[in-house]
Structure formats: C-alpha cells, structure tokens
C-alpha cells in the first residue's frame, strides 16, 4: 500500500505540471476558433449579397430590354395591320401610284424649264443704252395753303433740298403764286 500512495503522489505532482499549460492553450484555442468562424461567415455573407445585387441588376436590365423589344415588335405589327385594314401601304413603303405621279410632275417641270430658257435669254440681253437724260429744271407754282413740306412730298425731295434749290432761309415762308425750283442741278 505504500506503493499505492507513492504512486498517487507521483501522479498528483505530474498532473499539476502537465495539465495547467494544456488547459490554458485549449482555452485560447476555444476563443480563437469562434472568432475565425464569425469572420468567415461575415465574408461569405458579404460576398453573397454582392453576387446577388450585381447579378440581379444585370438580369433586370436584360429582361427589361427584352420586354421593350417585344413591345416594339407588337406595335410594328399592329401598325401594319391597321395600314392593311385601311388599304394604305405600311409606313416606309412607297406607294407605286405616288411614285408615278411624282415622275410625271418632274417631266412637266423639265419641259417648262426648257420653254422658259429662251425667254430668259431674251431677258438677259441688255437693252441699248439710253441717252443720258439732261437735267431739266422743273418749277412749281405755290398754291394757297401749300407749305414747303407738302411740296417736298409731292416731288419726292426733302424740305432741305427744296430750300437749297430756292435759296430759302429757315424762317422764310413761301407765298401764293411763288415759283419754286423742284428739280434740276444744284
């Protein structure tokens, strides 16, 4: 029995030396492992959100574009059906009868242009020069109630020109029966 007690003593001393460091490492490992798992889960969760957000936006654009294209095709088909029902050609397709009418009109315009060319040539010829007009003096006899302004308007000249032609001062009035020069050289 003595042996048993020694054995126990030895085991106790050995147990104290071995277990405490292992327990400390196990407790540190036990704390580190959940932290790593949490970080990995957060990265996976963020990656999943990024994937679905970017994938969803591109899928939304393509589906929207395909829906728009389908609607455009339907509208074009409906326009064609309406045109067929009304007996008119579809938009963008030229009507053969209209093309014939346009061609006929263009031929008529060409004929008219050819006819007008000789007339234009006649008009283009310069007329013989006129002899220079001699500056003839014209006179006006002042009637009762006439003013320089009325006379100047009648002959298409200004009041100042009328005064210069007749050597009249600014304040000088015209008299009934007076002869005024209304055209000629100054």
Image (spheres, grey):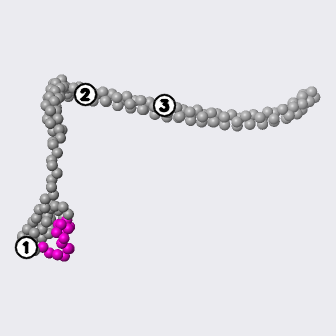
Give me the residue at 11% from left, 62% from top.
138
In the picture of the structure, the residue carrying the numbered disc 3 is 55
Give me the residue at 23% from left, 25% from top.
93
Give me the residue at 7% from left, 73% from top.
176
Q: Is residue 47 left or right of residue 124?
A: right
Which corner quadrant holds the N terminus?
top right
Give me the residue at 93% from left, 29% from top.
2
**Precedes in sequence: disc 2 or disc 3:** 3
Q: Nearer the viewer, residue 27 or 151?
A: 151
Q: Is residue 56 left or right of residue 10?
A: left
- Crowding at dot 2, Cα within 10 Å, few <14 / some 14-19 / many 20+, comes out as few
In the rendered image, the residue lying farthest to the right is 2
The mark closer to the camera, 3 or 1, is 1
Q: Secondary structure at mark 2?
A: loop
Q: Quadrant of residue 29?
A: top right
Compared to 102, does 127 lie above or below?
Answer: below
In the picture of the structure, the residue carrying the numbered disc 1 is 176
Magenta segment, which residues?
160-174
Q: CA distance from mark 2 to mark 3?
A: 40 Å
Q: Secondary structure at mark 1?
A: loop
Location of residue 151 in the rendering, given as x and y in whole percent from the top left corner: 12, 66
Give residue 92's mark. Answer: 2
Compared to 118, does 126 lie above or below?
Answer: below
Q: CA distance from mark 3 to mark 1?
A: 104 Å
Q: Are marks 3 and 1 in contact (CB under 8 Å)?
A: no
**Precedes in sequence: disc 3 or disc 1:** 3
Q: Is residue 173 magenta?
A: yes
So how many labels did they put on this image?
A: 3
Location of residue 158 in the rendering, given as x and y in whole percent from the top left corner: 18, 64
Q: Is residue 121 magenta?
A: no
Compared to 77, does 27 lie above or below?
Answer: below
């Amino acid at each position: 029995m003595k042996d048993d007690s020694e054995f126990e003593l030895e085991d106790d001393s050995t147990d104290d030396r071995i277990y405490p460091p292992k327990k400390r490492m196990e407790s540190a490992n036990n704390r580190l492992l959940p932290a790593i798992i949490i970080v990995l889960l957060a990265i996976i969760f963020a990656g999943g959100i990024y994937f679905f957000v970017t994938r969803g936006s591109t899928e939304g654009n393509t589906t929207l574009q395909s829906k728009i294209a389908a609607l455009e095709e339907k509208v074009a088909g409906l326009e064609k059906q309406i045109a067929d029902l009304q007996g008119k050609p579809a938009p963008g397709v030229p009507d053969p009868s209209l093309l014939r009418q346009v061609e006929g009109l263009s031929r008529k315009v060409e004929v008219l242009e050819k006819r007008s060319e000789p007339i234009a040539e006649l008009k283009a010829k310069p007329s013989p020069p006129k002899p220079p007009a001699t500056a003839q003096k014209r006179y006006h006899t002042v009637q009762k109630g006439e003013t320089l302004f009325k006379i100047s308007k009648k002959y298409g000249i200004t009041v100042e020109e009328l005064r210069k032609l007749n050597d009249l001062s600014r304040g000088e009035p015209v008299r009934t029966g007076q002869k005024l020069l209304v055209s000629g050289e100054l």
